[in-house]
Image (cartoon, grey):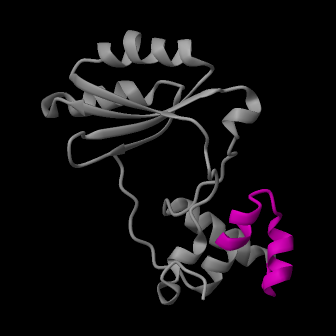
Amino acid sequence: MKKARKHLLDDLDIAILRYLEQDGRRSFSEIAEELGVAVSTVSARVSKLIDHNVLSILASINPFAVGLEALAIINMTIEPSQYEEAVAVILEYPEVNFASMTSGEHNLIVDVFCRDANHLTELITQRLYKVNGVQDIKVTYQIQRLKLGPMGIDLLQPESGGREE
């Protein structure tokens, strides 16, 4: 699994990220005008942020708005000797929205979007449990998502501590 290199962000990078976090479709010319810099500067900075795996621009779909009614967080224990192969299979499932290696009782957590309870049941019983190396699965059904959105650019400014004063 590829790790992002640490990239030191300056105030201009953070400002650009803040605009894109609010609206990923915002044009570079609008951002440049707001920040008082050239469009080529914004374009170059965004390209650099993408190249350094700091930024990716994608659409975030509200699963409930498109009819996906069964969301779950699945904690899994995978045999360490088969971990990489099992994770490679699991990441290919279209239902997997997010995945992370974890410590503690389980070593993988995945967030899934499914059409309904039957679809979720099929994913768990017919596919996940059949992946070589999967030893245990614990499912937490998500009743309601309370936040669906970006992480918050303010976390990148150490003096704020992630909180507004």
Residue 33 vertical position relative to residue 57 in the rendered view, above or below: below
Please, which residue is most extreme toward the front here?
Answer: 143
Residue 84 location (% of width, % of height): 25, 33
Residue 81 location (% of width, % of height): 13, 31
Examine the image and state in which quarter residue 35 appears: bottom right
Give the quadrant of the N terminus. top left
Residue 115 vertical position relative to residue 20 in the rendered view, above or below: above
Q: Residue at x 61, y 78 (%)?
A: 14
Q: Residue at x 65, y 70 (%)?
A: 17
Residue 64 vertical position relative to residue 6 in the rendered view, above or below: above
- Is 149 a magenta residue? no
**Residue closer to the observer: 28 or 143:** 143
- Is 29 a magenta residue? yes
Residue 125 location (% of width, % of height): 38, 12
Stretch of the chain drawn in magenta: 17-38
Examine the image and state in which quarter residue 73 appears: top left
Secondary structure that dominates the magenta span: helix
